[in-house]
Amino acid sequence: MIFATSRSAFARASAIRASAFAPRFASTLTIIEHADGAILPSTFKTLTAASQIGGPVTALVAGSTAPAVATEVAKIPGIEKVLVASNGAYDKGLAENFSDLIASTVKDGGFSHVLVSSSAFGKNVLPRVGATLDVQPISDIIKVAGEDTFVRPIYAGNVIATIKSTDPVKLVTVRSSAFEAAPAPSSGSAAVENVANDPNTPSPTEWISEAIAKSERPDLGSASKVVSGGRGLANKENFDKVIFPFADAIGAAVGASRAAVDSGFADNSLQVGQTGKVVAPELYIAVGISGAIQHLAGMKDSKTIVAINKDPEAPIFQVADYGLVEDLFKAVPDLTEQLKK
C-alpha cells in the first residue's frame, strides 16, 4: 500500500513538472548569436534546424545592440517573432546571465524546443539552462529526425546515435557544418517584442578583457576553403612560412591539427578536430597531417579533401579524395608559386 502511494505521488509530481511549461504543440526558441552588430553565420544554420522541427520559430536576441540586430532578424523568412533583451549584461555571452534569461523566456513563452549553435557559447550556456529547467540537453546534432528525435555523432564520429527525448523542453545544440544556411534577411516581417532583460541575481562572474587576433583571412568556422597544417611542419617558423602563403594564394582560412597547436605552431583558435572546431568546407587541404581519428572527426564532412604527406601509409589518405605523396616543403611552395602566377 505504501509502495502504491509513493508511485502515485511520483506520477503526480512528474505530471506537474511536465505541464508546468509544456506547450500544446512544437514551438522553437532559437538563440541568435551576433557580434559587432552582425548575425553570426552559424545562427543561419541553427535556424534551418529549427525550421525542420515544425511549429513556429521565435528568435531571442540579447545585448546592448539587440534592437538593431533584431530588425535584421525579423526580416529572415520563417521567423514568426523576435524577442529582444536590450541589456549590456548579455554582451559577452556570460552563461550565468544568459541562462536565467533563456530559462525565464522558455517558461513564459511555453516553448517546446531551444536551439543554439554548437559553439563555445552554446556549449557553455545550455547545460546551465538544463540544470535550471531540470532537463537533459542534447548536444551537437547533425540531423532533425522528428519533433522529439535527433541524430548526433559519438565516439569521435565513429558511431551515429539517434536520440529520442521525452523531456517537456528539448535543449539542443546544432553542429553548423551539418545544415545549410537559412535565407538571408529579405522579405520576412516577424513581430518584435521586448522581454524582461535584467538578470535575476547578481552574476558571480565578471568579464575582464579579451584579446582578439584580427585577420583578413576567412573565418575558419564558415570558410569555403581551409588549409590545415600538422606536426609534419616541424616548427612554427615552417608553419608560418609554408601554410599562410599557400592559404592566401587560394583565399582559404588556416587551420591546424591538435599536434600542431600543442607544439606551439599555431594558435588554439585554429585547431580543427574533436576538441577544436568542426568544419565542412567545399575544399579542405591537409598539409603534413597524419590523420589521427580526433582530427578526422573535425573535417571528414568536407566536400573535397586533399592530403599532402610524404608517408603513403598516413591515415589521412583513407578519407582524402585526392592525395599527393610528396615532401611538403617542396610541394606546397611550388603550388603556392604556381597559384600566384
Image (spheres, helix red, strand yellow):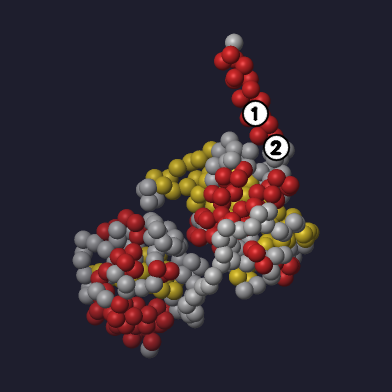
Image coords of residue 47 (percent x, y) = 62, 57
Q: Who is closer to the viewer here, 24 or 206? A: 206
**Does residue 146 appear in this view?**
no
**Callout 1: few (<14), some (14-19), or many (20+) C-alpha neighbours within 10 Å?**
few
Image coords of residue 97 (percent x, y) = 62, 58
Q: Earlier in the sequence, mark 1 or mark 2?
A: 1
Q: Residue at the spot x=73%, y=67% of the render?
A: 67
Q: Residue at the spot x=45%, y=42% of the render?
A: 161
Q: Is residue 283 above or below residue 154?
A: below
Q: Which residue is mark 2?
A: 20
Q: Who is closer to the viewer here, 304 or 196? A: 196
Q: Residue at the spot x=34%, y=80% of the render?
A: 240
Q: Is residue 223 above or below residue 200?
A: below
Q: Could you tell me the amino acid type at mark 1?
A: Ala
Q: Which residue is mark 1?
A: 13
Q: Mark 1 and mark 2: span between their CA atoms?
A: 11 Å
Which image quarter is the N terminus in? top right
Q: Could you tell me the amino acid type at mark 2?
A: Ala
Q: Is residue 134 above or below residue 211?
A: above
Image coords of residue 199 (percent x, y) = 67, 57
Left or right: 11 with respect to 155?
Answer: right
Q: Secondary structure at mark 2?
A: helix
Which image quarter is the C terminus in? bottom left
Image coords of residue 124 (percent x, y) = 52, 56
Q: Secondary structure at mark 1?
A: helix
Residue extending furthest toward the top:
1
- Residue 175's label in the rendered image is none
